[in-house]
Image (cartoon, rainbow, N blue to C red):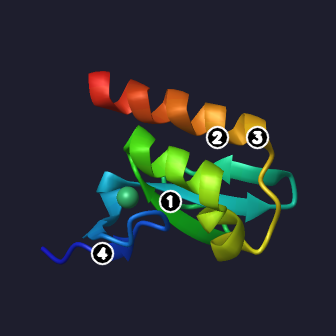
Amino acid sequence: MHTPVRMCAACRKRLPKEELIRIVFTDEGVLIDPLGKLPGRGAYLCKDVKCIDKCAKKGALVRSLKRDIPAEFYETLRTYASGEKQA
Ligand SMILES: [Zn+2]
């Protein structure tokens, strides 16, 4: 079966789509898209706090999405990523 591969905006590693967090910018603002089905401009990140921190510091997501990301969103991402690991 063919698995689509996407690139992490932080470390630029290529991974199967389901191993990454999809982040999408919608009319309601920036959201995590767990099912990968939301329309809009998307970016991908590893489910890894290191990559999330890197984005928070270097603005890689801001560059990918061409939108400002609120600081709280990185907290949401961290919680999401650690939740995924325990699951
Ligand atoms: Zn990464």
Label annotation for residue 71: 3
Q: Position of residue 59 (x, y in %)?
A: 66, 62
Element at label 1:
loop
Q: Residue at x 87, y 60 (%)?
A: 27
In this view of the protein, can residue 29 be seen by the observer? Answer: yes
> Observer-nearest residue: 17 or 51?
51
Circle 4 sits on which residue? Answer: 5
Closest to the camera, between mark 4 and mark 1, is 4
Q: Residue at x 63, y 33 (%)?
A: 76
Circle 1 sits on which residue? Answer: 36
> Observer-nearest residue: 28 or 81?
81
Circle 2: residue type: Tyr
Closest to the camera, between mark 3 and mark 4, is 3
Q: Position of residue 17 (x, y in %)?
A: 34, 64
Closest to the camera, between mark 1 and mark 2, is 2
Q: Residue furthest front?
A: 57
Upstream in sequence: badge 4 or badge 1:
4
When asked about the image quadrant of residue 41, the answer is: bottom right
User: Rounded to the nearest whole Å, what is the CA distance between mark 1 and mark 3?
Assistant: 22 Å
**C-beta proximity under 8 Å, tags 3 and 2:** yes
Residue at disc 2, CB closer than 8 Å to ligand 1: no
User: Rounded to the nearest whole Å, what is the CA distance between mark 3 and mark 2?
Assistant: 6 Å
Upstream in sequence: badge 1 or badge 2:
1
Q: Position of residue 21 (x, y in %)?
A: 46, 52
User: Rounded to the nearest whole Å, what is the CA distance between mark 3 and mark 4?
Assistant: 28 Å
User: Rounded to the nearest whole Å, what is the CA distance between mark 2 and mark 4?
Assistant: 23 Å
Closest to the camera, between mark 1 and mark 3, is 3
Circle 2 sits on which residue? Answer: 74
Circle 3: residue type: Ala
From the viewer's perspective, tell me whether residue 4 is left or right of residue 52: left
